[in-house]
Amino acid sequence: MSKKSLIIVGMVLVLAAIITFNLVTQPGIKDLEGGFIERVFVRNEQNDGPIIRVYAVTVADEYWQQMQDYGNYMPHTKYGTTKVFFFDAGKPFPSKMELTEPHFSQEFKNNCLGLYEKDGMSQVHFTKYPFH
């Protein structure tokens, strides 16, 4: 191999190492405080129109910024909607979610700490105590 080829191979290897390091060290849900646990997830089966995702997640306390970060990490599809309802882990939470509102049984509304919504135009709305 010529010296020029060795330099090119070396540069490619360094670039690959940098890309791999960046991919492995990206922050994610596992890095958030609060003990987030996804309890329920429902998604419509329609793949040719807007995709609707609804989640119920428990959290140990009122970690508002982490709740919003958690919502930002969730999958979202252009023109679709993503809703994440955060519930107090120490209180009852829904075991079933629906695609249509109100999404879960009324008995759990007082246990909902926050609601993260990303709409079809990718606008984010985070509401503390959405049902109080």
Image (tube, grey):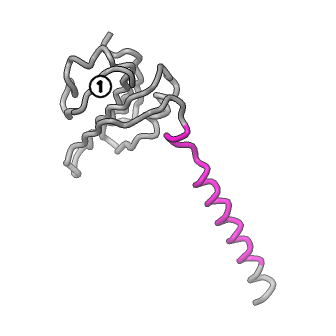
Q: Is residue 23 magenta?
A: yes
* Residue 106 location (% of width, % of height): 20, 18
Residue at 54% of width from left, 31% of height from top?
33
* Residue 16 location (% of width, % of height): 64, 66
Give neighbour class at mark 1: few <14, some 14-19, many 20+ (Cα, 10 Å).
Answer: many
Looking at the image, is 91 positioned above or below residue 98? Answer: above
Looking at the image, is 109 positioned above or below residue 35? Answer: above
Looking at the image, is 17 positioned above or below residue 54? Answer: below
Q: Give whichever of 74, 36 is nearer the camera.
A: 36
Residue lying farthest front?
90
Secondary structure mostly seen in the magenta stretch: helix
Q: Give whichever of 76, 41 is nearer the camera.
A: 41
Q: Is residue 131 left or right of residue 28?
A: left
Residue at 24% of width from left, 32% of height from top?
95
* Residue 71 location (% of width, % of height): 43, 34
- Residue 2, image quadrant: bottom right
Q: Give whichever of 115, 41 is nearer the camera.
A: 41
Q: Quadrant of the N terminus?
A: bottom right
Tell me where the magenta segment starts and ends, as one range: 7-31
Residue lying farthest top?
132
Question: Which structural element holds mark 1?
Answer: loop
Looking at the image, is 2 positioned above or below residue 98? Answer: below
- The residue identified by callout 1 is 93
* Residue 12 location (% of width, % of height): 68, 71
